[in-house]
Image (cartoon, rainbow, N blue to C red):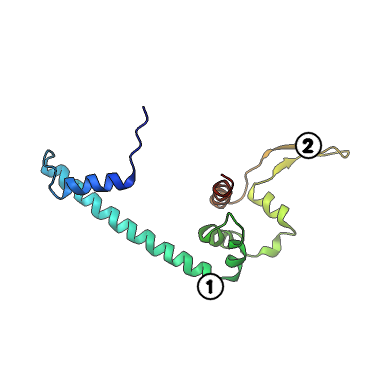
Amino acid sequence: MLICIRPVDIRRALGEIVDGRDSEFGDIFIDMLRDMREKRAELDNRIASYNRRFKNLFRSNEMCQRIGQIESAGPIAATASVASIGDKSCFKNSRQFAAWLGLVPKQHSSGGKARLLGLSKPGDRYLRTLLIHGGRAVNG
């Protein structure tokens, strides 16, 4: 049986244990949970800080704004694209960019017969993952 626990429920339960409302756990375990809760809060603050920085970079960069107009590309995918690509003039067209990223199949064509194989997956794996997940989120 699959049990689905929401993060909100976990936070609430940990809060009850750490704040002493559930006394069936030992002091060492509660201290450990308290430390984990503090570290999680620190990480949440750091993640929020980086997200603000990404959004500021996204707003201030023209290329990020242009990429952000694509339905499946948000601020993180747009800034990652600009960081990975650098100079867009090294690609003649969008198909070359897609091939560099590994989003188009390998071709072994001759005599007018096109033979398409599996995706080659070169390029920036993180960027490819962001774009694929963004596309899946948009298309359901």
| The furthest residue to the bottom | 60
Number of numbered discs on residues: 2
**How many residues crowd mark 2 within 10 Å: few (<14), some (14–19), many (20+)?**
few
Identify the residue shown where x is 56% and y is 70%.
Answer: 61
Q: Earlier in the sequence, mark 2 or mark 1?
A: 1
Under mark 2, the amino acid is: Arg
**How many residues crowd mark 1 within 10 Å: few (<14), some (14–19), many (20+)?**
few
Q: CA distance from mark 2 to mark 1?
A: 43 Å
Q: In the image, is 114 to the left or to the right of 101?
A: right
Which of these two is toward me, 122 or 71? 71
Which of these two is toward me, 93 or 8? 8
Identify the residue shown where x is 75% and y is 59%.
Answer: 92
Q: Position of residue 44 (x, y in %)?
A: 33, 57
Under mark 1, the amino acid is: Ser
Q: In the image, is 38 to the left or to the right of 123?
A: left
Identify the residue shown where x is 22% and y is 46%.
Answer: 14
Q: Position of residue 120 (x, y in %)?
A: 66, 42
Identify the image quadrant of the N terminus: top left
The residue labelled by disc 1 is 60
Q: Which mark is residue 88?
A: none
Q: Position of residue 57 (x, y in %)?
A: 50, 69
Q: Which mark is residue 115?
A: 2
Q: Quadrant of residue 50?
A: bottom left
Question: Does the CB distance between marks 2 and 1 fall below 8 Å?
Answer: no
Q: In the image, is 90 to the left or to the right of 49?
A: right
